[in-house]
Amino acid sequence: MSDTNEKRENENSDTPVQQELDKAELIEKMGQAVCSDAKHLIHCLTIIGQIEGHYILPPSDKTTKYEHIIPALVAIEQDRSIEGLVIILNTVGGDVEAGLAIAELISGMKTPTVSVVVGGGHSIGVPLAVSAKRSFIVPSATMTIHPVRMNGLVLGVPQTLNYFDKIQERITDFVTRNSKISAERFRSLMMNNKQLVLDVGTTLDGRDAVKEGLIDSLGGLSDAIDALYEMIEQSEPRYTDKA
């Protein structure tokens, strides 16, 4: 009797209805989607709200949890049926260490990747936006570049300032390695004190982000998908079976 029930459960899990329910659950819980009925099988990953790192943010905050994103990236890179990854960003930034860790993983993937900034790609969202092999931004989106900030108790000693400088150098190095902007220009935008009222830094709209060499192209979702398809068709297989 138990074997019969197990067989029925396995059959139900393969029905079109169950597959759609699984897709809906993936979108709701993880902010991810896989489109199978397309020219190429691609995975969509969203990075929205604040990037949550080692500390849990209040339930009222919209967050992207790095413990969800990191294993998803590992699975995508291993899955040979997934041909490409599109990353949709609308983030205010968040945990620097977590955001930079995710960006490093994306930049090291063999899977063809494209990013699209919609709404905002602020703070640590900047390295995430440039981590893909091709980056796009819509004209109405904005990206804020500013120095590293820390909440809570901070010791006012030279070692603290040195620590902040090292983090900023890591971010600057990553961004300049994965985009066309120079380190000198990125630092000048970061330390600009003439634009933001209560902070130093610079806010770029979509056109300015492309003009500065931070983002590759101005464009939306269809442009990103077209670029991803082109990359997929021109790329070699990621992994080959050894004889």
Image (spheres, helix red, strand yellow):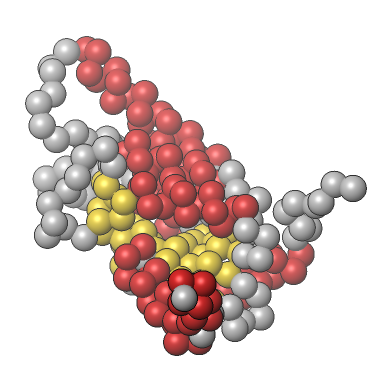
Horizontally, is 226 left or right of 191 in the view?
right
Of all residues, the one furthest to the right in this rendering is: 243
Q: Residue at x 48, y 38 (%)?
A: 174
User: Where residue 196 appears, x then y in whole percent?
Assistant: 18, 49
Compared to 8, does 236 lie above or below?
above
Q: Is residue 93 visible?
A: no
Near-viewer residue (60 or 164): 60
Compared to 13, does 64 lie above or below?
above
Near-viewer residue (27 or 178): 27
User: Where residue 16 appears, x then y in whole percent?
Assistant: 50, 87
Near-viewer residue (95 or 92): 95
Q: Is residue 108 visible?
A: yes
Residue 164 lies in quadrant: top left
Residue 82 lies in quadrant: bottom right
Q: Residue at x 21, y 40 (%)?
A: 55
User: Where residue 142 appears, x then y in whole percent?
Assistant: 32, 61
Residue 207 lies in quadrant: bottom left
Compared to 120, does 165 lie above or below?
above
Q: Residue at x 12, y 60 (%)?
A: 60
User: Where residue 86 appears, x then y in whole percent?
Assistant: 51, 65
